């Protein structure tokens, strides 16, 4: 976690950021310390990353990498304002004994990636920040299937603002933040999910961190905390109102290392024919297709040239969806 010592709203890269509204950096630090203390009180280890001047969003440290099985897949930020943050994370992982996979495609770490160990499944968001091609890259890096989910509401620009794991297998999410095809996929994969409504999502209620029992959650989302309690979890409310002004909350401030550094797992070579490693959509649903992902990526600043369409690389959808 990274203390918001240099926190400010100096630019606006999401709808929550208003550069004319006052921000209290000292209060942000106090709230952040309470978040760190909540983890410690629950028995979790908090590791601190040194904040750097000139990087006001560095407090949202979940965006710096995505870690599974001891491998850190590095971030590559969409906006130039945040790009130097990735270097700080890379340095930390490399000097702390982790395998570090350098990203080719734009992705914002745990902002758009999450992992469900009980299902050995990576869930990934695209539509605003992360390039959908980074989903395929992550499947290669981790040797795990990746389910691509398309985000459609600019207020919920990162997956972690609209969906979070409650434990190793179960999730909570806000359906309206996703494209129709992605919603159908989520319904099929997670029939036992806890669903959030518009008010829960607007209070950053989905941006929580759960250890399987305790759910550390933004205090504003009291209604959603009650739903989680009814579902058998123990909400731990923390007030992060100052950090909401930058468009983030509990989860954005909390990268999960998921254990210790380990030997890297064998890689999948996608180009050698591992199409099942990637589910981009229930095929046939409009507005949620691989081609749409490609088109969306085309407008991206400084994105590398698109590779040949996957269909021309010999990657075809399996006839039966892999989860059936
Ligand atoms: N101001 C930051 C941005 O727009 C907030 C990042 C929030 N982080 C997150 N994991 N959702 O990039």
Image: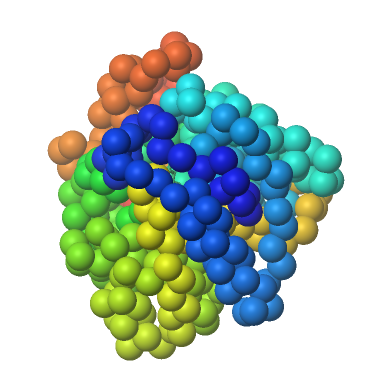
Q: Is residue 238 visible?
A: yes
Seen from the viewer's position, the closer of residues 32 and 301 is: 32
Q: Is residue 191 visible?
A: no
Seen from the viewer's position, the closer of residues 125 and 279 is: 125
Residue 142 lies, in percent from the top left, at 62, 45
Q: Residue at x 70, y 47 (%)?
A: 49
Circle count: 0
Residue 322 lies, in percent from the top left, at 41, 53
- Give the quadrant of the C terminus: bottom left
Q: Is residue 209 above or below residue 293?
A: below
- Give the quadrant of the N terminus: bottom right
Q: Residue at x 20, y 65 (%)?
A: 199
Q: Is residue 221 above or below residue 227?
A: above
Seen from the viewer's position, the closer of residues 30 and 98 is: 30
Q: Quadrant of residue 150?
A: top left
Q: Is residue 94 above or below residue 24?
A: above
| Quadrant observed for ligand 1 in the rendered image | top left
Most extreme residue toward the left is 286
Residue 29 lies, in percent from the top left, at 55, 56
Seen from the viewer's position, the closer of residues 68 and 146 is: 68
Residue 230 lies, in percent from the top left, at 33, 88
Report the side of 54 relative to 246 (left or right): right
Q: Residue at x 39, y 16 (%)?
A: 301
Q: Residue at x 78, y 53 (%)?
A: 261
Report the side of 134 relative to 153 (left or right): right
Q: Quadrant of residue 306?
A: top left
Report the side of 229 relative to 40 (left or right): left
């Amino acid at each position: 976690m990274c203390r918001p010592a240099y926190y400010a709203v100096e630019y606006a890269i999401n709808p929550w950021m208003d550069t004319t509204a006052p921000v209290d950096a000292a209060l942000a630090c106090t709230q952040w310390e309470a978040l760190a203390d909540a983890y410690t009180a629950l028995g979790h280890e908090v590791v601190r990353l040194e904040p750097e001047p000139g990087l006001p969003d560095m407090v949202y440290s979940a965006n710096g990498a995505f870690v599974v099985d001891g491998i850190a897949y590095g971030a590559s930020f969409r906006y130039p304002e945040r790009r130097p943050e990735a270097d700080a994370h890379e340095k930390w992982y490399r000097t702390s004994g982790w395998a570090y996979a350098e990203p080719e495609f734009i992705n914002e770490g745990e902002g758009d990636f999450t992992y469900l160990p009980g299902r050995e499944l990576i869930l990934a968001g695209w539509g605003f920040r992360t390039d959908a091609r980074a989903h395929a890259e992550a499947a290669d890096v981790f040797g795990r299937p990746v389910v691509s989910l398309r985000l459609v509401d600019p207020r919920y620009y990162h997956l972690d603002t609209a969906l979070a794991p409650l434990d190793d297998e179960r999730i909570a999410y806000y359906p309206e933040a996703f494209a129709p095809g992605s919603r159908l996929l989520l319904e099929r994969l997670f029939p036992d999910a806890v669903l959030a409504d518009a008010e829960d999502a607007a209070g950053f209620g989905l941006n929580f961190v759960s250890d399987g029992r305790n759910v550390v959650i933004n205090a504003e989302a009291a209604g959603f905390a009650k739903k989680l309690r009814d579902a058998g979890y123990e909400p731990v409310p923390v007030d992060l109102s100052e950090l909401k002004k930058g468009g983030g909350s509990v989860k954005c401030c909390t990268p999960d290392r998921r254990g210790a550094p380990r030997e890297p797992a064998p890689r999948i070579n996608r180009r050698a024919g591992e199409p099942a490693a990637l589910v981009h959509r229930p095929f046939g649903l409009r507005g949620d297709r691989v081609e749409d992902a490609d088109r969306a990526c085309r407008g991206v600043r400084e994105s590398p040239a698109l590779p040949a369409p996957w269909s021309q690389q010999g990657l075809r959808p399996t006839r039966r969806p892999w989860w059936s």
